[in-house]
Image (cartoon, helix red, strand yellow):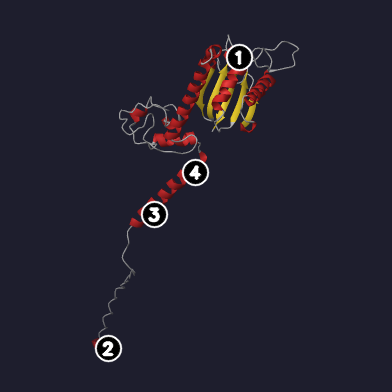
């Protein structure tokens, strides 16, 4: 039979689906080196602005402490050394050090200050030496003038000359055997007038401005007396100023007159000690 002779065609095989993924890359990868460089730059800028902030937010003493702390010295030599109990274990550059190698120092100056430096009122080895020598010269001149008179020679022990942050201070100190003023008054005694005359002749040619500060002891006043140690100390400072003017000091040189009563005792353990009564004459910077 003809229909039986016809055979069915074999089905067409299924073709596989091929997905081709194409990745486009414009250029080669640069790596992460730029990130490291940028991080270093940002860190440096942060340190720079931190330094600027520290300079503006700290005092001069604290800045000196910071400089002294980071000076190239070993930590074990910093302990028990100058300023070891201050800010960051070094609040003083100019104090006495115990470093084993002093070749880079001038006197008591650490290597953080150049030997021949000059600077502000509180800075510089040369300025410190000049102030010390000036105070020593004033003290020696006063003592020499007092020794010329047998009457005044014993008053040399009443005079103390020293450096202070504001300048050169001359303290005229009372004791059990000497008093500049009559008890409870602003009346200068004769020996005190002569002593002030010696002081005036010593500092008369000095161009520095002068400040006079009066101090008293803490002895109580008699009941019913209207005066007090505040008015007494300021009145004695004014009496001292007037006596210095009579001895040749120009009125224009006086910058400040003040009385602090018994608030700044010389003998802190005994506020009633007569040595707390004193006049401080400051030759200002």
Mark carried by residue 38: 3
**Quadrant of the image occupied by residue 265:** top right
CB-based contact (under 8 Å), mark 4 and mark 1: no
CA distance separating discs 3 and 4: 23 Å
What residue is shown with label 2? 3
Q: Earlier in the sequence, mark 2 or mark 3?
A: 2
Q: Residues within 10 Å of mark 3 (few under 14, many from 20)?
A: few
Nearer-N-terminus badge (4/2)? 2
Between the C-alphas of marks 2 and 1, the distance is 161 Å
Kindly identify which numbered label has been placed on residue 53.
4
Which residue is situated farthest in the bottom direction here?
2
- Give the mark, 3 or 4, whose residue is nearer the N terminus: 3
**Res 152 visible:** yes
Whether the residues at callouts 3 and 4 have beta carbons within 8 Å, the answer is: no
Task: Determine which quarter of the picture holds residue 178.
Answer: top right
Q: Secondary structure at mark 3?
A: helix
Per the image, the residue denoted by label 1 is: 191
The residue lying toward the viewer, choosing from 45 and 181, is 181
Give the position of the N terminus as an image quadrant: bottom left
Residue 114, position in %: x, y? 38, 38
First in sequence: mark 3 vs mark 1: 3
Depth check, front residue: 84 or 172: 172
Q: Quadrant of the C terminus?
A: top right
**Residue 252 sits in quarter:** top right
């Amino acid at each position: 039979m003809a229909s039986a002779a016809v055979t069915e065609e074999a089905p067409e095989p299924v073709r596989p689906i091929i997905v081709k993924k194409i990745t486009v890359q414009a250029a080669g990868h640069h790596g992460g080196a730029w990130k490291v460089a940028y991080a270093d730059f940002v860190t440096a800028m942060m340190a720079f602005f931190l330094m600027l902030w520290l300079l503006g937010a700290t005092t001069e003493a604290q800045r000196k402490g910071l400089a002294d702390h980071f000076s190239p010295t070993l930590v074990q030599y910093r302990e028990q050394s100058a300023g070891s109990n201050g800010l960051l274990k070094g609040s003083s550059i100019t104090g006495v050090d115990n470093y084993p190698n002093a070749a880079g120092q001038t006197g008591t100056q650490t290597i953080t200050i150049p030997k021949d430096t000059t600077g502000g009122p509180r800075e510089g080895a040369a300025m410190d030496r000049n102030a010390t020598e000036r105070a020593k010269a004033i003290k020696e001149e006063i003592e020499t003038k007092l020794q010329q008179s047998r009457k005044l020679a014993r008053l040399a022990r009443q005079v103390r000359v020293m450096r202070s942050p504001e300048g050169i201070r001359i303290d005229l100190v009372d004791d059990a055997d000497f008093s500049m003023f009559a008890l409870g008054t602003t009346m200068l005694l004769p020996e005190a007038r002569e002593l002030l005359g010696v002081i005036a002749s010593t500092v008369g040619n000095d161009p520095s401005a002068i400040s006079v500060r009066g101090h008293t002891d803490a002895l109580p006043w008699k009941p019913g007396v209207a005066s007090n140690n505040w008015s007494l100390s300021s009145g004695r400072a004014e009496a001292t100023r007037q006596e210095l003017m009579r001895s040749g000091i120009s009125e224009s040189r006086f910058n400040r007159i003040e009385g602090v009563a018994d608030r700044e005792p010389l003998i802190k353990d005994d506020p009633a000690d007569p040595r707390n009564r004193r006049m401080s004459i400051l030759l200002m910077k």
